[in-house]
Amino acid sequence: MALGTLCLVDDKLRIWSHEDLQTLCDLAALVQSFIFSMENVQYKAQLEYEANHDALTGLPNRRAFQHSLNYLIRQQKNADRDMALLFLDIDNFKNYNDTYGHEFGDLVLKIFGHVLRDNVRTQDIVARLAGDEFTILLHQLEHSESDVNQICNGLLAALGSIEKVAGIPVVLSASIGVCLGRARQHLIPDTLMARADSAMYRAKQAGKGRYFLG
């Protein structure tokens, strides 16, 4: 299978010797090897991306989130600022699937992910765990609770500003559970997740469309 052509131009008439032709063949083989090598690198990079990102939203997936959480917790032992883990669940998401179908539900998930990514700081990490469950890692918080309050209120306001999806009226909101990780403390990933998850359910039980600090 041909990958391309190799064209050499000379300003003088030339008779190609056997050695010249062999040199060209060697050069073509070298170029082919380089192309195959680059394709292999790109293929591996694509596999790595797919292994760490959610196919629907393009956000980091559970695997990537867990890696980031473990890394930040290790850093937190010597950090000067707090971090926070946010656990988010889309309110009444099942109704979208049941009423309008899974394609519409997928569109809601995409929009929800975009809203989260667009309304946090550059250094923060947004991930989709599964279904309608998302997480956000906030690190280097300068004013802990006030920073969390500002970000959560901004997220809820941004979600509430969406009135239609694909022309269909929606009331998009989320229940958010928050767990703070204090600076210079020994933190346990599963404990942070459990506390954030519990806080999220308390927010949902309190009426949805709000956040709760656990």
Image: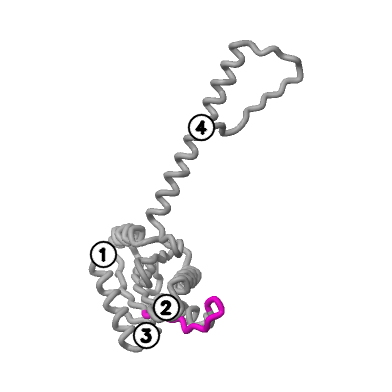
Q: Amino acid at mark 3?
A: Lys
**Which residue type does callout 1 highlight?**
Pro
Give, as a three-letter code, the residue at label 2.
Cys
The residue singled out by tag 2 in the image is 152
80 up-or-down from 148: above or below: above
**Disc 4 marks which amino acid?**
Phe
Contact (Cβ within 8 Å) of mark 4 with mark 2: no
Q: Which mark is residue 208?
A: 3
State the SS at label 3.
Answer: loop
Which residue position holds label 4? 34
SS at badge 4? helix
Q: Residue 195 versus residue 80: which sits nearer the camera?
A: 195
| Label 2 vs 3, first from the N-terminus | 2
- CA gap, disc 3 and disc 1: 25 Å
18 sits to left or right of 206: right
Please state which of the two labelled residues, at mark 4 or mark 2, is closer to the viewer. 4
**Crowding near pointer 1: few (<14 within 10 Å), some, many (20+)?**
some
Q: Which residue is mark 1?
A: 189
**In whole angstroms, how far apart are the C-alphas of marks 4 and 3?**
56 Å
Q: CA distance from mark 2 to mark 1?
A: 21 Å
Provide residue 95's location: percent of width, then percent of height.
Answer: 40, 81
- In this rendering, the label closer to the viewer, 4 or 1: 4
| Residue at image point 31% right, 67% down | 183
Upstream in sequence: badge 2 or badge 1: 2
User: In the image, which residues are magenta?
Assistant: 165-175
